[in-house]
Amino acid sequence: MKTILITGAGRRLGKTLAEHYWSLGWRVLAHYNSQCELPDDPRIVRLQADLSDPLAVQALCLQLAGLGPVDAVIHNASCFVPDSAVGAAELGDHVTRHYQVHVSAPVQITAALDNQWTTTASMVVMSDIYAEIPNQRFSVYCASKAALQNWALSMAQRLAGRVRVNVIQPGPVQFLPEHSEEYRQRVLSQSLIRRELGYGAIVQACDFLLAADAMTGTVMRVDGGRFVANRYDQTFNV
Ligand SMILES: NC(=O)c1ccc[n+]([C@@H]2O[C@H](COP(=O)([O-])OP(=O)(O)OC[C@H]3O[C@@H](n4cnc5c(N)ncnc54)[C@H](OP(=O)(O)O)[C@@H]3O)[C@@H](O)[C@H]2O)c1
């Protein structure tokens, strides 16, 4: 039986990924933070940790050491807070929190698994197209996702021959309930396929990358063409 560790597996995309691999017969090490909506099952091992807390990450790493060989990891957990949500006095904590969740935790978890990878192991890191596009509202989120992505490519080098490491950059996968209809339409008008991708698009990409034994060090956009959509009007001819 194969084993996959998925961080942020309690809700939304992480939960969908966890259910998918569980339904394929994998044992799922399901890390979650506040809430785990996965069913109770012997093949689902729940691991609670606030990844913004270095001590909690250490404790999680110790737990992982006792859970045997690992075939795949998806670093999916994410902190998505606009800069405007915090005042000047909390800005340092805001930065630290994003870097803890997006960089420190994946770094520590990956190091902790060093002796547990199976011979065909693979790791997928969930970044964002905004790792490469400036966004003044979410500058700290974007910067920390860029750091995550760069680290992942270093891991593709370091773990070469042992673990394949690839990055997915999702575009607008699934809107949040608080997103207004106007917001949704504006975002979708900036993509090429002009519809919400749905979690299935990312599941498909993970399936592909976990199986594609010639692929490592790849950054794959699954964004409905939003990255290459015409962000600036280039159609004028003067
Ligand atoms: N949804 C999209 O359209 C979209 C677009 C681009 C990129 N992505 C990327 O795709 C991935 C999944 O997207 P999503 O929308 O499902 O993400 P999400 O809901 O924002 O977060 C994913 C998970 O991370 C967990 N998390 C947040 N803070 C944490 C902390 N301090 N410690 C541990 N876990 C924490 C959340 O658990 P709690 O809620 O319990 O804290 C949640 O289950 C993320 O990496 C995201 O950046 C998504």
Image (spheres, grey):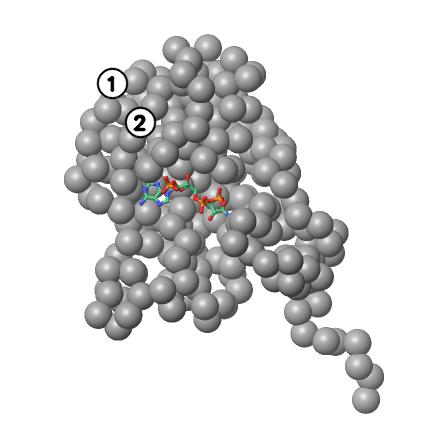
Does residue 234 appear left or right of residue 133 in this picture? right
Q: Residue at x 33, y 37 (%)?
A: 34
Does residue 61 appear left or right of residue 34 in this picture? left
Asked where in the image residue 59 lies, by quadrant, the reply is: top left
Does residue 209 appear left or right of residue 111 in this picture? right
Residue at mark 2: C-beta within 8 A of ligand 1? no
Gap between marks 1 and 2, in whole Å?
12 Å
Residue 151 visible in rendering = no
Q: Residue at x 50, y 38 (%)?
A: 12
Residue 94: % across, % down: 29, 60
Residue 122: % across, % down: 47, 29
Question: Which of 229/111 is in front?
Answer: 229
Classify 10 Å Cα crowding around label 2: few (below 14), some (14-19), many (20 and above): many
Amino acid at circle 1: Gly
Classify 10 Å Cα crowding around label 1: few (below 14), some (14-19), many (20 and above): few
Residue 152: % across, % down: 42, 45
Q: Where 124 falls versus 67 (above or below)?
A: below
Q: Residue at x 46, y 71 (%)?
A: 136
Give the numbered dot on residue 38: none
Q: Residue at x 53, y 31 (%)?
A: 16
Which residue corresponds to mark 2? 47
Q: Where 236 falls versus 141 (above or below)?
A: below
Q: Which quadrant contains ligand 1?
A: top left
Does residue 181 appear left or right of residue 30 in this picture? right
Q: Nearer the viewer, mark 1 or mark 2?
A: 2
Which residue corresponds to mark 1? 66
Amino acid at circle 2: Leu
Asked where in the image residue 182 lies, by quadrant, the reply is: bottom right
> Mark 2: which secondary structure?
strand
